[in-house]
C-alpha cells in the first residue's frame, strides 16, 4: 500500500494554482539530489463537486496519509466536500495531525474565550468549529498569489513552506533550514563535478586555459548564489523567531531582528525590525545577582543604585552595574527585603528577615541596628529630614525610630505590614496591611482608611505633592486615592499580583511592578503608556530615577534592569478650551506657539507655562507661524483675517480681503513677506503692511496649506482639489505633484529646498524631487494624513493623522516610532530647529512635546540594550 506524508484538502476554485505549488515545494524542500521527491504528498487533481464518485479514492488516500494540510479560505470553508474530508479525518485521526495554511480570509483568535472569532464568517469549515481550546498552528500564505510568488525563490513563500515542512519532517524550522542549505551545497558540489568532467572534455578540444578560467567564474557565481540563498533562509528564520520572542523578551527579539538585517537587509525584514523597535521597550541588565533581587532604590543624585538581595546582601552600584560596596551580615543567611537611601544620600537603610533594620554609612560600616520586631521587616523608609526611620514588619507592627535606635512610636495593625511611607512633609505616615492602607499622624492617631482592594496591599506611596496616595495590591490592581479615602483611579492590566508601585518625580505618571514579569508606566487616567517586558520571573521592586527619565526594576530572576522612558511625553500643554489647530516652534528653539478653536493663540515656554495669550480674532485660529527672528507671530483665522503680532500680544497689522477663513500662514525666509492660504480658493503673497503682492488662483477647491522654499523664490500650496503646486512669486504654476485624486492636506519643503513632502487624504505621504518624481511613499496610517514635516537634517519624515497617531519615518519608508496618547485627531506637527523635539497639536484641546528618539541603527549601537549571549547565538545558529 502506498503511503503519503500529507493529504492536501482544498477548494479547486479558490486554490487551483496554490495547491500544486505547495505540493511541489513540500516535496522538493531539502530534497537530496538522488531522490525524485523528499516527501510523498497527495493532492486530488479532480474536483469532487464535479465527480462525487471519486470519494472512494479520496478515503483511501486519507487513510494512507500521516498529516492533513487544509488550505483555509472563505471558499473552502463553504465547500461541502472539503468539510466532508475534514470530518472523515477527525473521525479517524488526531486533530494534532491537521495543519492549516491560510490562503484567504481571516483566522482571528480570541485569547479571552479561547476560541476563534466569527465562527460563521471565518476561513474554517463547520467541521472545525469549536474543536480548538488553544490557538492552533497555522501558516499564512495570503501574500502568495501570483505564479512568481509561488516559488521557493520567494523568501516569504519559502518561510511559510519551511514551517509546514518542519512539522512534516518532525524537525525544528532552524534545523530543517540548515539541512536545506546543506542539501543545496551537496547539489552544487555534484553539479560542479559534472561541470568539471565536461570541462575536462572541453579542455581536450579547445584548450585548458580558457576553460579553467570559465570554471572559476562559474564556481564563484555558484558559491555566491549559495551564500545568498543561505543568508535569505537564515534571515527569514531569524525574523520569524524575533516576532515570536517579542512578547516575552523584546531585547532578544530586536537582537535577532538585527542579525536578520545583517544577513539580508530586505525591506520587509527592516520594516519588521523597526516595528519591534518602535512598539517595545528595551533594557540593559546592570545587576546579575546570586539570588532573587528583593528591593531597588536610586540615590538622590541619580548616580548610583542600591539593591537588596535574598542572599542577605545589599549592594551599592554605579549605573553601569559595577559594585561599589556590599552591605550584609556575614555570620548568617539573612535575606534583605527592603533598602532605602537617606535623603542626603550619605547613608543607607536595610530591613531583613530576622526583624532587624540596619543603618549603614557608604563605607559599609554599621552605624545603628534597630531591634524590636519579632518577624521579618518588609519595608523601611527615611523621614524627609533624615532624622527618623520607619520600619514595617510581618509581626503586625510599624515602628518609628530615632537614629540612635530608640523606638518613638509603635503603630499596631491586625495583619502583617508589607509597605510603609512618609508623607513628603514628614508629618504623616502611610501603612499598607492586609486589604487596607491607613494614614496616621506621628502621634499614633489614625487619620484615614483606604479600603477598596479585594486582596492584600503589597505597596504604598505618596505623590510628590503629598495630596494623593498610591496603593498596589495582590488583586492585580493599583489605586490612586485622595487623602479623604476616595478612589480617583483604578489601574488594571496586569495579570498577576502587584509587588511594587511608585510615583514619577513630577507626579504625572505612576509605575507598577507585577509578578507577571512585567512593569508598566501609566498616566493618571489609567492608560498604559509603556510596558516593560523582559524579566523571566516576577518583578519585586520598581523605582524612578530622580530626573524621571529612567526606570529601575528588580526581579526574582536575579537581575536588576535599567529602562529608558523614551516613549514618555516630554511636556503637555494644557490651557486652551477648544481644539488646537496649529503648532509652531520658534526659530530660536525657546518657545512653542499654538492656535486654537477658542479664538486665541498662546506662546509657551518648553515647560508648558503660558507666556502670552493673543486675543483679537472673533473665530478659531487655524494656523500660526513665527517670524524668522522669533520676534513676531502670524495667525490665520476663521474670521477671514490674518494678524501680525508682537510677543506682548499687540496687533501690528491686520490682513483683510478674504471671502472665507484663512487655513494656513507662513513667513518668507527674510521675514519681509507673508503667505496665506484660504478656503476662498486663493493663496496670497502680501507685504507686512497688508498690501497684496500676488494672488495664486488656479484652484477649483479650497487651499489647505502653504509653504515658502528656503531661498524664498518659490511657494508651495496644497489644496482640496488634489495636487500640490509649486509656484514662482509672479503667480506662475511651475509643477504639479499628482499622487492621488484625494486632497493634499499639508505640504513642506526640506531645509535644502531640493525635496517636497505632501500629505494626502488617501492616507499616504509622499516625498518628491522638484521635477515631480516620487522618491518615497509613506504608508501605514489608517486614516487621512492631516499634517507633515521634514526634520532639519532631512533624514526623517513626520506625519500626523486623523487616526490620532503621529509617525516618525526614515527615508526608506520605515516607521521609526509611533507617538500615541491623544484622544482625538492630530491637527498639526513640527520639528524643533535642532530636530530633537516634536510638538503635536490635536482636536483634544492639548498639545504635547515629545523627544525625538534615535533611529534603530544608532540605538543598536548605543549600549542601551543587552547584546546576545553566547548561549543565545548558539541556540539560533548565529556565528
Image (cartoon, helix red, strand yellow):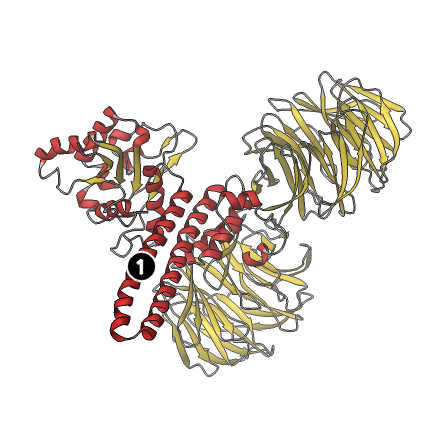
Tell me the residue at 62%/72% (across/down).
627
Tell me residue 841's x, y (percent): 55, 56
- Residue 331 spot, x, y in % from top left: 81, 25
Which residue in the protein does label 1 denote? 193
Camera sees residue 6: yes
Position of 528 relative to 797 (above/below): above
Q: Nearer the viewer, residue 55 or 277?
A: 55
Crowd tier of the residue under label 1, counting other residues whose Cα lies within 10 Å: few below 14, some 14–19, many 20 or above: few
Which residue is depicted at the point 44% across and 81% down?
731
Side of 796 where 171 appears, left or right:
left
Q: Position of residue 793 (x, y in %)?
A: 57, 68
Residue 475: horizontal and vertical position, in percent? Answer: 59, 25
Instruction: Please report the residue visible at 80 percent of the width from the left and 21 percent of the height from the top.
Output: 411
Q: Nearer the viewer, residue 842 or 391?
A: 391
Residue 570 is left or right of residue 248, and the answer is: right
Which residue appears farthest toward the right when viewing the image?
Answer: 404
| Quadrant of the rendered image containing residue 439 | top right
Q: Quadrant of residue 63?
A: top left
Residue 620 visible, this angle = no
Residue placed furthest toward the top: 414
Q: Element at badge 1?
A: helix
* 597 w.r.t. 386: above or below: below
Left or right placement of residue 18 versus residue 641 in this view: left
Amino acid at each position: 500500500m502506498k503511503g503519503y506524508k500529507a493529504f492536501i484538502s482544498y477548494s479547486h476554485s479558490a486554490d487551483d494554482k496554490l495547491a500544486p505549488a505547495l505540493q511541489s515545494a513540500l516535496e522538493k524542500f531539502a530534497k537530496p539530489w538522488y531522490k525524485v521527491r523528499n516527501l510523498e504528498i497527495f493532492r486530488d487533481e479532480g474536483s469532487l463537486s464535479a465527480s462525487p464518485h471519486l470519494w472512494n479514492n479520496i478515503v483511501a488516500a486519507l487513510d494512507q496519509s500521516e498529516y492533513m494540510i487544509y488550505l483555509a479560505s472563505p471558499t473552502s470553508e463553504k465547500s461541502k466536500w472539503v468539510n466532508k474530508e475534514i470530518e472523515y479525518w477527525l473521525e479517524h485521526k488526531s486533530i494534532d495531525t491537521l495543519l492549516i495554511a491560510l490562503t484567504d480570509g481571516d483566522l482571528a483568535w480570541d485569547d479571552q474565550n479561547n476560541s476563534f472569532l466569527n465562527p460563521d464568517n471565518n476561513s474554517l469549515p463547520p467541521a472545525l468549529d469549536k474543536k480548538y481550546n488553544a490557538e492552533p498552528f497555522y501558516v499564512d500564505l495570503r501574500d502568495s498569489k501570483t505564479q512568481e510568488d509561488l516559488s521557493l525563490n520567494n523568501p516569504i513563500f519559502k518561510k511559510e513552506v519551511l514551517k509546514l515542512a518542519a512539522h512534516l519532517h518532525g524537525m525544528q524550522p532552524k534545523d530543517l533550514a540548515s539541512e536545506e542549505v546543506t542539501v543545496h551545497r551537496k547539489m552544487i558540489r555534484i553539479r560542479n563535478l559534472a561541470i568539471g568532467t565536461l570541462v575536462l572534455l572541453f579542455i581536450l578540444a579547445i584548450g585548458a586555459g580558457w576553460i579553467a578560467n570559465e570554471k572559476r567564474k562559474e564556481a564563484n557565481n555558484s558559491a555566491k548564489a549559495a551564500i545568498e540563498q543561505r543568508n535569505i533562509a537564515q534571515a527569514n528564520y531569524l525574523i520569524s523567531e524575533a516576532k515570536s520572542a517579542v512578547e516575552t523578551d523584546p531585547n532578544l527579539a530586536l537582537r535577532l531582528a538585527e542579525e536578520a538585517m545583517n544577513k539580508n537587509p530586505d525591506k520587509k525584514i527592516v520594516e519588521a525590525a523597526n516595528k519591534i523597535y518602535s512598539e517595545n521597550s528595551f533594557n540593559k541588565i546592570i545587576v546579575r545577582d546570586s539570588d532573587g533581587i528583593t528591593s531597588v532604590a536610586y540615590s538622590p543624585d541619580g548616580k548610583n543604585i542600591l539593591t537588596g538581595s535574598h542572599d542577605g546582601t545589599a549592594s551599592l552600584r554605579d549605573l553601569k552595574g559595577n559594585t561599589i560596596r556590599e552591605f550584609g551580615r556575614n555570620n548568617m543567611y539573612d535575606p534583605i527585603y527592603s533598602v532605602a537611601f537617606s535623603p542626603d544620600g550619605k547613608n543607607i537603610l536595610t530591613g531583613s528577615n530576622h526583624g532587624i533594620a540596619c543603618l549603614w554609612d557608604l563605607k559599609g560600616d554599621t552605624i545603628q541596628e534597630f531591634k524590636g520586631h519579632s518577624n521579618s521587616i518588609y519595608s523601611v523608609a527615611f523621614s524627609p529630614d533624615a532624622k527618623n526611620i520607619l520600619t514595617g514588619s510581618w509581626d503586625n507592627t510599624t515602628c518609628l525610630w530615632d537614629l540612635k535606635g530608640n523606638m518613638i512610636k509603635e503603630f499596631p495593625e491586625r495583619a502583617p505590614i508589607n509597605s510603609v511611607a512618609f508623607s513628603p512633609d514628614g508629618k504623616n505616615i502611610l501603612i499598607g496591611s492586609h486589604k487596607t492602607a491607613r494614614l496616621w499622624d506621628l502621634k499614633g492617631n489614625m487619620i484615614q482608611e483606604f479600603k477598596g482592594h479585594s486582596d492584600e496591599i503589597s505597596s504604598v506611596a505618596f505623590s510628590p505633592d503629598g495630596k494623593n496616595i498610591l496603593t498596589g495590591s495582590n488583586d492585580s490592581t493599583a489605586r490612586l486615592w485622595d487623602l479623604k479615602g476616595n478612589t480617583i483611579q483604578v489601574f488594571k492590566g496586569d495579570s498577576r499580583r502587584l509587588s511594587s508601585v511608585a510615583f514619577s518625580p513630577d507626579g504625572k505618571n505612576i509605575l507598577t511592578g507585577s509578578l507577571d514579569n512585567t512593569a508598566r508606566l501609566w498616566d493618571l487616567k489609567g492608560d498604559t503608556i509603556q510596558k516593560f517586558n523582559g524579566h523571566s520571573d516576577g518583578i519585586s521592586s520598581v523605582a524612578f530615577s530622580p530626573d524621571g527619565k529612567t526606570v529601575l526594576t528588580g526581579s526574582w530572576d536575579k537581575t536588576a534592569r535599567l529602562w529608558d522612558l523614551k516613549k514618555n511625553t516630554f511636556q503637555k500643554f494644557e490651557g486652551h478650551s477648544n481644539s488646537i489647530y496649529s503648532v509652531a516652534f520658534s526659530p530660536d528653539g525657546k518657545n512653542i506657539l499654538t492656535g486654537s478653536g477658542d479664538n486665541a493663540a498662546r506662546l509657551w515656554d518648553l515647560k508648558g507655562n503660558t507666556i502670552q495669550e493673543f486675543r483679537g480674532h472673533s473665530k478659531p485660529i487655524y494656523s500660526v507661524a513665527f517670524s524668522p527672528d522669533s520676534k513676531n507671530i502670524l495667525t490665520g483665522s476663521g474670521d477671514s483675517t490674518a494678524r501680525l503680532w508682537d510677543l506682548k500680544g499687540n496687533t501690528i497689522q491686520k490682513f483683510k480681503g478674504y471671502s472665507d477663513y484663512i487655513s494656513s500662514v507662513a513667513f518668507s525666509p527674510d521675514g519681509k513677506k507673508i503667505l496665506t492660504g484660504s478656503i476662498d480658493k486663493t493663496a496670497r503673497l502680501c507685504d507686512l503692511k497688508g498690501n497684496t503682492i500676488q494672488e495664486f488662483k488656479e484652484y477649483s477647491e479650497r487651499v489647505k496649506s502653504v509653504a515658502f522654499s528656503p531661498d524664498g523664490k518659490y511657494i508651495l500650496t496644497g489644496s482640496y482639489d488634489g495636487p500640490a503646486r509649486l509656484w514662482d512669486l509672479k503667480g506662475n504654476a511651475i509643477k504639479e505633484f499628482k499622487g492621488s485624486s484625494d486632497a493634499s492636506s499639508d505640504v513642506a519643503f526640506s531645509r535644502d529646498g531640493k525635496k517636497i513632502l505632501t500629505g494626502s487624504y488617501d492616507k499616504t505621504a509622499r516625498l518628491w524631487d522638484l521635477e515631480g518624481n516620487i522618491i518615497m511613499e509613506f504608508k501605514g496610517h489608517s486614516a487621512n494624513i492631516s499634517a507633515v514635516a521634514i526634520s532639519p537634517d532631512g533624514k526623517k519624515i513626520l506625519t500626523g493623522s486623523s487616526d490620532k497617531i503621529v509617525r516618525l519615518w526614515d527615508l526608506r519608508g520605515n516607521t521609526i516610532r509611533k507617538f500615541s496618547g491623544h484622544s482625538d485627531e492630530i491637527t498639526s506637527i513640527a520639528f524643533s530647529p535642532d530636530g530633537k523635539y516634536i510638538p503635536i497639536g490635536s482636536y483634544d484641546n492639548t498639545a504635547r512635546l515629545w523627544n525625538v528618539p534615535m533611529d534603530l541603527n544608532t540605538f543598536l549601537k548605543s549600549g542601551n540594550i543587552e547584546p546576545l549571549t553566547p548561549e543565545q547565538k548558539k541556540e539560533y545558529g548565529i556565528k
